[in-house]
Image (cartoon, coloured by chain):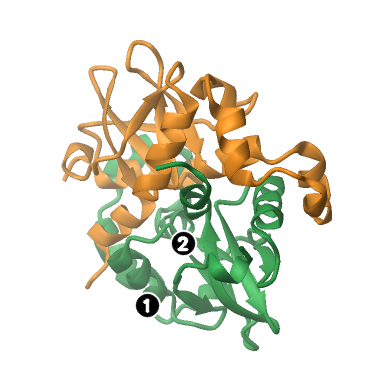
Chain colours: A orange, B green
Amino acid sequence: MQARDMVEEFPVTSLDADALEAAKVMAAERLPGLVVVDARGRPHSILGASQVVRFLVPRYVQDDPSLAGVVGESLADQVADKLSGVSVRRLLPEEPQELAVVHADDTVLELAAVMARLRSPLVAVVEDDQVVGVVTASRLLQLVTPQ
Amino acid sequence: MQARDMVEEFPVTSLDADALEAAKVMAAERLPGLVVVDARGRPHSILGASQVVRFLVPRYVQDDPSLAGVVGESLADQVADKLSGVSVRRLLPEEPQELAVVHADDTVLELAAVMARLRSPLVAVVEDDQVVGVVTASRLLQLVTPQ
């Protein structure tokens, strides 16, 4: 079996996409993250759902969650305020999470090795520099674990 | 809204549970991880699916994935060999991933603050020292994002 035979559908966003739209996709499909590609469709990084949450919560509340009570605005209101007109690029940390990548013709064990080395919950599969899908750790376990 | 109103069902395993059973649950339900509790049901850590993959792949292949071809045994065979008779405790890294925890009566923003500060994709919700469920980052986004 090769990586191309293992891939799952996984929504992809781009660095210049609308942050609110990306958040809505993660929310609607209950995804832990999105693969972010650059303007040429090449894999760039992962945008984790917790990264979006991080962008929404004021820094002083992150430092001391007991201060949450003094914030007048609800988190739902902050979503509109903070994400409107913002690009996905802005949500990424200064050092974006490295994206684990394998080629479509790599084997199961090569894919597992890359996932293990980078401690990554998912690996992007590329062919001709384009992302053709991802393989999550639980998908890999599904393929190799007796049911 | 309080944390108890947000929780999702999320399978829990324990430090002394069977590692192969834990892997099967993640595989069958396509979960990115399990909450690990101690013998008294108190939250201990997260066991990520990628941690199980890490346990299966020989160290020299992790260091150099191009060596995957020299491994005679398939990953599926390694699952049985390596996980049989092993406890979940053995799969955890030496410094287990800290589990983000909130109390059942904490607010949405307090939960978001803890998630943001620890960059955690999920938060365990406890009441009387017992895990009553978890809230994932995508669940939180679902609750605060306009659909």
Answer with mark 1 or mark 2, whichever residue precedes in sequence.
1
Q: Are marks 1 and 2 in contact (CB under 8 Å)?
A: no
Q: Chain of mark 2?
A: B
Question: What residue does disc 2 label?
Answer: B33
| Residue B26: % across, % down | 37, 66
Distance, label 1 to label 2, CA atoms, is: 13 Å
Q: Of tags 1 and 2, which is closer to the observer?
A: 2
Whether residue B55 is situated above or below residue A61 in the rendered picture: below
Quadrant where the C terminus of chain A lies? bottom left
Question: Foreground: B133 or B80?
Answer: B133
Name the amino acid type tagged 2.
Gly
**Snapshot quadrant of residue B73:** bottom left
| Residue B20: % across, % down | 37, 75
Whether residue A20 is situated above or below residue B7 in the rendered picture: above
Whether residue B75 is situated above or below residue A118 in the rendered picture: below
| Residue B39: % across, % down | 62, 87
Question: What residue does disc 1 label?
Answer: B21
Q: Chain of mark 1?
A: B
Residue drawn at the location 63% of the way across and 35% of the way down: A55
**Residue extending furthest toward the bottom:** B40
**Snapshot quadrant of residue B4:** bottom right
